[in-house]
Image: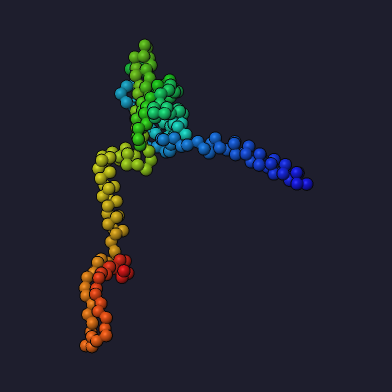
């Protein structure tokens, strides 16, 4: 009977180990340096590309960069793995609106996508050439910042990031001053002890040392 219980326990233990082995690769995988949600702008650069273009979303998960850009009358999803230094480079299908002397309208082409993550910022570029002997150039500039950062606020509002940093530092200092502000009588007090009795015989003399009030409490 004891042997059957031991085998049953061992079987359960091995089953748990196998299940843990299946879970650990994903759970133990450390988040990438640039993982998280990113916000920003996409805009046509110099060249034949014209029309509306906007950034729909940008996300990095386990060093996989996923971005959706709306242009050429459609959503353009792009998925590119990041290099260890934060750089990306790949060729992707991308739709744009273009205008040349011969033609206008949406066009899908193979674009070279290159860019670099650095700190809380990303700068990238999509570029291609088309037409006779590549006579027409089209470029898309992409600027992103990690959501919730000063860089993101500066990018979306056009404000100077250095001024935003100073404003945040001033706000933090003001919060510290408010948190340290105590009650009306907080602080260190000095004084002396006076014996009101006219008979000093047998009375012990007392000497005042210090007194402090903090948050309406005498310490």
Q: Position of residue 57 (x, y in %)?
A: 42, 36
52, above or below 148, in the image: above
Tell me, what colour scheme is on the image? Answer: rainbow
What is the quadrant of residue 207 in the picture?
A: bottom left
153, above or below 101, in the image: below
Q: Position of residue 142 (x, y in %)?
A: 36, 30
Q: Residue at x 22, y 70 (%)?
A: 190
Q: Residue at x 30, y 55 (%)?
A: 175
View extreme (bottom): residue: 199
Q: Residue at x 21, y 75 (%)?
A: 192
Q: Position of residue 42 (x, y in %)?
A: 36, 31
Location of the C terminus by quadrant is bottom left
View extreme (top): residue: 133
Q: Residue at x 27, y 57 (%)?
A: 177
Whether residue 174 appears in this view of the structure is yes
View extreme (right): residue: 1
139, above or below 19, in the image: above
What is the quadrant of residue 214 in the picture?
A: bottom left
Count of residue discs: 0
Left or right relative to 100: residue 20:
right
View extreme (front): residue: 202
Is 151 in front, or is 125?
151
Whether residue 96 appears in this view of the structure is no
Q: Position of residue 1 (x, y in %)?
A: 78, 46
Left or right relative to 48: residue 68:
right
Left or right relative to 192: residue 53:
right
């Amino acid at each position: 009977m004891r042997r059957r219980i031991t085998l049953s326990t061992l079987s359960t233990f091995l089953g748990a180990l196998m299940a843990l082995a299946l879970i650990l690769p994903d759970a133990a995988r450390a988040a990438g340096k640039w993982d998280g949600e990113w916000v920003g702008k996409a805009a046509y650069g110099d060249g034949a590309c014209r029309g509306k273009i906007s950034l729909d979303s940008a996300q990095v998960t386990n060093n996989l960069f996923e971005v959706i850009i709306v242009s050429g009358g459609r959503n353009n999803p792009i998925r590119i793995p990041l290099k260890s230094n934060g750089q990306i480079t790949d060729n992707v299908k991308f739709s744009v609106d273009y205008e040349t002397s011969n033609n206008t309208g949406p066009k899908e082409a193979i674009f070279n996508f290159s860019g670099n993550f650095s700190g809380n910022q990303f700068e990238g570029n999509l570029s291609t050439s088309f037409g006779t002997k590549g006579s027409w150039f089209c470029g898309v500039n992409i600027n992103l910042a990690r959501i919730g950062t000063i860089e993101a606020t500066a990018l979306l509002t056009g404000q100077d990031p250095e001024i935003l940093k100073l404003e945040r530092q001033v706000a933090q200092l003001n919060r510290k001053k408010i948190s340290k502000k105590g009650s009306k009588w907080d602080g260190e007090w000095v004084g002396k002890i006076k014996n009101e009795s006219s008979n000093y015989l047998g009375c012990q003399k007392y000497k005042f040392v210090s007194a402090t009030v903090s948050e309406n409490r005498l310490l």
